[in-house]
Image (tube, grey):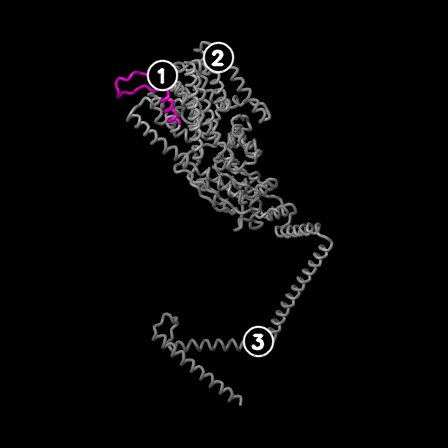
Amino acid sequence: MAKAAKKAETKAETTDLRTVFAACVLFRVVNALCVRTFFSADEYWQSVEVAHKLVFGYGHLTWEWSHGLRGYLHPLIFAIPYKIAQTIGLDSTAVTVWSPRIVQAVIAAAGDIHVYKLAHRWFAGAKRKAKDEKSEGAAEPDAAARWALFCSLACWFNFFCAVRTFSNCTEAALTVAALAYWPWTGAASENDDVKNVKRPLSLALAAAACVVRPAAALYWLPMFVEESVKSVSRVRFILKEALPIGAAALAISTCVDRAFYGRWEIVPWNFFRFNALDGGGALYGSHPWHWNLTQGYPAIATVFLPLAARACRDKKRWAPLAVVGWTVLGYSVPAHKEFRFLLPALAPTLAAAGAQLASFSGRKRVAAVALILLTQIPAALYLSLRHQSGTVSVMSVLTAAVDAGETHSAGILSLTPCHQHPWTTHVHRPNVGMRFLRCDPPGFGTPKGELDEADKFKADAGAFLRFNFGKGWAKPDGSLADAAAWRDVLGVDQVGWDRGIPKPGDIEPNLHRKDAVKARNAALKVPSHVVMFDGAYALDGVAEWLRSWGFSKTADLRHADVPVDREIQSRVWVFSRPDTDPDHFEIAAVAEETGMTWEQAEKATMRLREATKRRDREETMTHEERLALHERMARERREKEEKRAAELKRRSEEAAAAAAKAADPDAIIADRRRKEEEERLRVEENERRKLLGEDDRPDEELTPQERLDRMIRQAAANIERAEAAAAKEAEGKKDEL
């Protein structure tokens, strides 16, 4: 009977856990759909972008993947849904964007449920007698687990980060699962059977966490040492459990990396050498040694940290904060620090905080819960929906431009530093190029002693753009203006157009013929769209370069309300331009190869193109169609010659008439007399107006009486003028008689 009852109880607990897990999955899926902001480039470029390239065959891999610093096991998690979608023909943009988030939501839910289990194991049987009814009572195991789950779901940093596709997030879920099965000293109670502790499973999960992110070894090293010293069966632990499981995990990951790299790479060693021995992480920012203790961990743990400290004041319950302590201290050694690195250390704090909430009662618990909700929800929503949203929402703008056919062969240029937004996972269109500002470390893509592209752009943005893409001379349609503009693109003077002689005082004074050809080829790749932060537009030469190629701003997206990181600004701008006239580059090539002037090259190019078109048409015509074409062309040629002859005849007749008129003396005398008579009449009219006192004001400025007086004077003057003309005419006739 006892065994049956225990079996039924175990079955009921399993059913309850499944229900709780389903609820966690639902919550995390909604959580994943709510996260619309940017956190770090690794969210995309070290996981889903790699998976996209593995499955679909196009995309971009960062420098880490060229030097064996990253393992392929983590991207393979997201490659699975991609491959399934490709196989069944449902690989749309929505699938490539959201399927990895859904997978990560399930992983995050698994982490939540193991926070539940961890609290149940650690704080099971943590009973102490209450002094009176108002005092704090003991936390029951189920209550501690439920409140620990509440803390995990309510934590702002879990909401903001746990559903992102970082390797840190998968590492955190695996770590808390391993902690839930680890044989903690003092964790087992009368409600926790030591025999059920699954140490090999815990080791396997810990090994998986180290494979996903080698830095997780720092988390587990002290725990491995402690278990090796205190375990009764230390030989079994080391030789039959730890070493075989660790070796198997390393062998599997190495074989997987060998399959995708095409060479043998020991990724954990490469990772350790670059970050620990070479100090490569400091290239992406450095912090003081105490940053994790004073800023990093308090910021992500917030109100849960004092609750956890209170729960662990019992010496038997020191383990949670001990795990947190050595992890935070261990991550304080490297110079480069980030909030997400501390995510695996957050679960023990949440489990302990949940146990402390379970021990509260009445108003104290209500106050604690209210404090948690008031501090966590606003931060979670603001950071997940608004802060740094521009670099994610801009992908919708670019995808719409690609679908509308507004991008041409040159593709898109991103002037945001170090991959500040995703690419192929959100566009998912082959043959659409994107150029990024690379930030490869010295010796890993950037020559030693030189600046990377992002730093070169920041140092002299105008020179960087002109050197890599040329300088345009834009017409309203975006095409170059003339030969002089093309010579400006190449950086050569007018005399040396066909020889590549550099212009005096040019930005690139050492430009020679090969460099000129290279510059021309670069100009052929001027992008159709440019993405940048508003701060980059203010750099010297950027606005001028955009205007030279006919760019105009087509999107203005809000990004951040406060300055963040090193170069990130408040808004994200998108500039676009029409496709450059390809005729211009063809003419430039003909001019350079033949030494012709621009006008000669243009005429030759157009004639060659028309001849090519005519030849292509004739090759597909029948004999009758070809005869009809030749007759039509002959007729058009005759009509053109006739029009030209008629125009020449008309011009010659007009010239002859003008010459004859100029040679006739009578016509010259008559024309002179006509001009003299007109001048005499003009003078008489002016004198008459002066005598009459007429003013030159327009009628609109006169009073009615003044307007009437003007009309009377004008009528009298007309009569007087007519009488004078009649008298003059009569006198002329009298003289003739």
Query: In the drawing, does residue 562 fall left or right of residue 674?
Result: left
Residue at the front extreme?
1
Q: Which element is circle 2 on?
A: helix
Q: Which element is circle 3 on?
A: helix
CB under 8 Å between discs 2 and 3:
no
Amino acid type, residue under disc 2 in the picture: Phe
* Residue 84 location, quadrant: top right
Residue 259, above or below 57? above
Mark in the foreground, 2 or 3? 2
Residue at the bottom extreme?
737
- Residue 335 in picture, x, y percent from top left: 44, 25
* Residue with the mark numbered 2: 237
Residue 455 seen by the camera: no
Query: In the drawing, does residue 574 fall left or right of residue 638?
Result: left
Q: Is residue 106 magenta?
A: no
Q: Which element is circle 1 on?
A: loop
* Residue with the mark numbered 1: 125
Residue 219, above or below 561? above
Residue 655 seen by the camera: yes
Q: Which residues are magenta?
A: 127-152
The alpha-carbon separation of the residues under discs 3 and 1 comes to 130 Å
The image's mark for residue 668 is: 3
> Count the marks: how many?
3
Q: For this rendering, which residue is in front, 691 or 217?
A: 217
* Quadrant, the N terminus: top left
Count neighbours of disc 1 (C-alpha within 10 A) and say few if under 14, some if 14 to 19, many if 20 or more: some
The alpha-carbon separation of the residues under discs 1 and 2 comes to 27 Å
- Residue 407 in picture, x, y percent from top left: 54, 43
Q: Is residue 146 magenta?
A: yes
